[in-house]
Image (cartoon, helix red, strand yellow):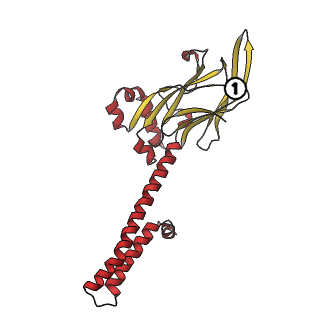
Amino acid sequence: MKYLLMLKNLSNGVIIAGIGIAVLLLFFLFGSLPKGLPTYLIAIAVGGPLIYLGLKSYWQDHEIQRLLQANAFLKMSKRMAVISDIKKSEENGTVKTTFSFTELDPSEEPYGQKRVFTIEGCCLYIDSMVIKFEDKYIEKGDDFKGKALCLIRRLFSEKIRPDDGFPIDPEGQTPQACISDNSRFQQFQENLWKEFWKLAQDPDYAHKKGVRATHGTAPYMQLEEGATYKLEMRTTGELTIKRQ
């Protein structure tokens, strides 16, 4: 079965090159002409171009697939959450916004319990820390460095100081939503979060770890009553908030 699947997945280039090789072998082993210069010339004239075209087609198909795969990895999301159940009220002239914050797992199913918060104002800021890996790891879908890491420190608003915001993930620890059953990957994440600011301040050390950048980011969105928003981070580390 394994070999049948391999044959099924062969590209046109491999098939063409295979035909060219087969032609050469047939001429060399079973050629009806007397073996000599004419036989070899016919074999090369027929089989040579087929091999060349086949290999050229194979490498072109391979490069196209590599670029498509790299592009797909760049668009994949890692950390996700939904902001919903938005309601607004006014108290003593101050607008307050209540909303629920629900994290999602990789299959976009709810992870953990829905948390409800109330902020003063209308704009929700999401204070986060991100670890971005070098593009070469993301493009090939590296098991450990194929996706950026994100820690959501706290939520606040235009009326609330960051220090007075609502905490989400403890700084310096792997976020609960990102804890892995793979002990090696889990240790890998923990070490990076413990060294977050060292990675940010020491470019040479960061490069050795395959890290492109580490820094804080705080995208924000003006929340509208009745709307639903999705927070997501691409593998390259861009954190976005988009209305659904």
| Viewer can see residue 142 | no
Residue 62: horizontal and vertical position, in percent? 43, 58
Q: From this viewpoint, which residue is outermost toward the left?
A: 37
Depth check, front residue: 109 or 21: 21
Q: Residue at x 58, y 18 (%)?
A: 165
Kind of residue sitting beneath label 1:
Glu
Q: Is residue 112 above or below residue 164?
A: below
Above-or-below relation of 161 to 183: above
Q: Can you give x and y, in whole percent of width and height, for residue 22 in the image?
A: 39, 78
**Drawn side of residue 26 relative to residue 234, left or right:** left
Dividing the picture into quadrants, the one containing residue 107 is: top right
Whether residue 101 is visible, yes or no, is yes
Residue placed at 48% from the left, 67% from the top?
6
Among the 4 quarters of the image, the one containing residue 135: top left
User: Dot 1 corresponds to which residue?
Assistant: 224
Q: Position of residue 88 (x, y in %)?
A: 73, 21
**Relative image position of residue 163 (x, y in whole percent):** 54, 16
Classify mark 1: residues with Cα within 10 Å, few (<14), some (14-19) or many (20+). Answer: some
Residue shown at the point (34%, 79%) measured from the top left: 24
Of the 4 image quadrants, the one containing the C terminus is: top right
121 left or right of 36?
A: right
